[in-house]
Every structure is written in structure tokens, then in C-alpha cells.
Image: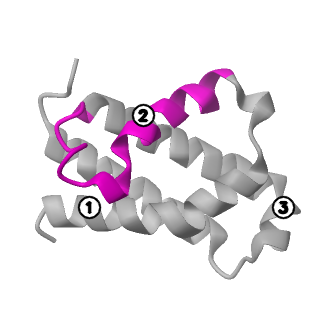
Amino acid sequence: MPSSDPLKRLGDILEQIARIEGHVAGMDEAAFRSSPLTQDAVERCLERCCEAARKIGDGLDGKYPEADFVNLRRFGSILRHDYGDIDIEIIWELVRSRLPLLKAACRTELDL
């Protein structure tokens, strides 16, 4: 069931993105690959983003297709259940190219 407060969930996503940005600040892909602690922290923050997107529901899917809320919700299931099959390159690519789009959509929706 979608959350009764989607604005709170969008704020949660922005908070987790800020944490991820802090975790990977100054890192390149090689540094990220060599830091299991950072990988774990980023994956946990991504899980929270995915869960918040799940609680928001599908109301923003068409409005912000570039943010890809649909696949964000699906990715949460992968992080929770298929964690052994996660390719760190995919996580890095998501952090570098997809999160800025999600961040922009959340900020636009919250009128920040």
C-alpha cells in the first residue's frame, strides 16, 4: 500500500542519496571496488531508497520517467533477496548516473 505521506518518502530518498554521496566522495570506481565497507553502506542506503520508492507507489512513474521509479522498486527486491548476484559495477553505475536523475526528480517534486 502506498504511503500516506509520499513527500516524507521523497525526503527519505534525498537523505539516503546525500549519505551515498558522502560515502563515495572523492572515490573512483577502483577505490569503490576496493572498499567493501563503502559498498555495504551504499547498498544499504540504496535499499532504503528502494523501500521509500515502493511506499510512494507508482504515482510518479509517468511524471519522472528519467528517475526510473519502476526499476528502483524492483531493484530493492534484488538487493534484499539476490544480494549474492549483485555486480558492483552496476551499483557504481547507478550511483554515478542514475542517482542524480532520481535526486533531481525528488527535488522537483518537493519544490526545492
Expressed as whole percent of the image width and height from the top left, the position of residue 49 reads: 43, 44
Q: Is residue 70 left or right of residue 64?
A: right
> Looking at the rendering, in which quadrant would you find the C terminus?
bottom left
Mark 1 against mark 3, which lies toward the viewer? 1
Query: Residue at point 14% right, 60% down?
Result: 110
Q: Secondary structure at mark 1?
A: helix
Disc 3 crowd, CA 10 A, few/some/many (<14, 14-19, 20+): some
Expressed as whole percent of the image width and height from the top left, the position of residue 52 reads: 34, 37
- Sequence-wise, the earlier of marks 1 and 2 is 2
Q: Amino acid at mark 2?
A: Arg
Q: Which residue is mark 2?
A: 73
Residues rendered magenta in the picture: 56-81
Q: Residue 79 magenta-drawn?
A: yes
Q: Is residue 20 left or right of residue 58?
A: right
Q: Amino acid at mark 3?
A: Arg
Residue in the foreground of this view, choosing between 56 and 35: 56
Q: Which residue is mark 1?
A: 105
For the residues bearing labels 2 and 3, Cβ distance under 8 angstroms: no
Q: Secondary structure at mark 2?
A: helix
- Sequence-wise, the earlier of marks 1 and 3 is 3
Disc 1 crowd, CA 10 A, few/some/many (<14, 14-19, 20+): many
Examine the image and state in which quarter residue 59 appears: top left
Examine the image and state in which quarter residue 96 appears: bottom right
- Figure disc tally: 3
Q: Which residue is mark 3?
A: 33
Q: Secondary structure at mark 3?
A: helix
For the residues bearing labels 1 and 2, Cβ distance under 8 angstroms: no
Mark 2 against mark 3, which lies toward the viewer? 2
